[in-house]
Image: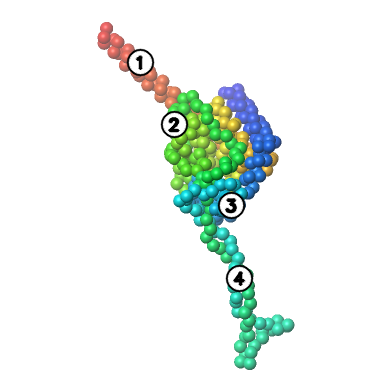
Amino acid sequence: MGKERVSREERMSEIQAKLEAGVREIFESGKYEDYISTMSKFPHYSINNCILIVSQCPEASHVCGFKKWQTDFNRVVNKHEHGIMIIAPMTYKADVDEPVFDAQNHPVVDANGKQVTEKVTREFQGFRPAYVFDVSQTSGEPLPTLANMLEAGVDDFETMRDVLIAVSPVPISFEEIKGGANGYFSPAGQCIVVRNDMSQLQTIKTMIHEIAHATLGHGGKEDKWDRETKEVQAESVAYWVAQMLGLDTSEYSFGYISGWSKDREVTELKENLDLIKTTADKITADLERELSKKVDKAEKIETEQEKVSQGVRKKIR
């Protein structure tokens, strides 16, 4: 048993080294520079506006205003699209009556002893509704990407999919998703939705990614991480689990992780490495137990069928 555990630990260490090296390579390539220069043009929104955006468009990935899509990205908003409402800051001027004071800061009064006032123009900060659009609502020049969609098949795909559904902490459904999202975990709805038209490998990888979000409690009461850290955590777990299952998702995962990281050191990965490893190990162990159950069940059914066949043969004799 001890030897098997050491072997597993060595495998985990090997995966960690591959993950860190693969992400580092993305940062050192010109591909990353092109990507980040484009992404830097997208505006940053407050936490309240992020909540508003997600509540109206859960699959939103990159959003900005109608004109900005045209001027900065050579894309246009499609006809009949409805904007996503956010709250935008605004300044406005207004004339107000203010009391007058003398040089000694004493109130100036008129002949009747009433406080003298004067009209002054003041600038105020306010808010107004504004509308933004997700990239899925636009058409035009493609945005650069670091993550390439996985196109490969998976041996025993149906079994792997069913086992992932079984170990997921929340229900998983497969649906059409508008926009660029391959899937999402809804903390409020306590469910996972996965795009229903992807390759087998991309489907399995996305399922693991969203299961990682749910397992890590992202979006829950105890959630203390920012969005970048959550995405790095979930995709790192997905890569780790896929590797343990003998599946290679590096073509997608390395670029995805580097795209979400805030710096070239991938601080989110390094600071959360123990949590990522522990979560990946837990999901892998759950999968192995579930797969073992399926194998035992299949063998039991095969044994029962063999007994029935033997009984039939005896009767024929």
**Does residue 267 show up?**
no
Q: Residue furthest bottom?
A: 111
Q: 241 and 255: which one is in front?
A: 255
Residue wearing tag 4 = 93
Residue 308 screen position, x and y as percent: 32, 16
Please report the residue visible at 54 percent of the width from the left and 31 percent of the height from the top. 150
Residue wearing tag 3 = 68
| Circles 4 and 3 in contact, beta carbons < 8 Å | no
Comes first in the chain, label 2 or label 3: 3
Above or below for 312 versus 69? above
Please report the residue visible at 52 percent of the width from the left and 30 percent of the height from the top. 151
Q: Residue furthest top?
A: 317
Residue wearing tag 2 = 162
Q: 171 and 293: which one is in front?
A: 171
Q: 249 and 29: which one is in front?
A: 29
* Numbered label attached to residue 306: 1
Q: CA distance from mark 4 to mark 3?
A: 27 Å
Amino acid carrying mark 3 in the image: Lys
Q: CA distance from mark 2 to mark 4?
A: 61 Å
Circle 1: element type? helix
Q: 68 and 228: which one is in front?
A: 68
| Circles 2 and 4 in contact, beta carbons < 8 Å | no
Comes first in the chain, label 2 or label 1: 2
Circle 3: element type? helix
Amino acid carrying mark 1 in the image: Glu
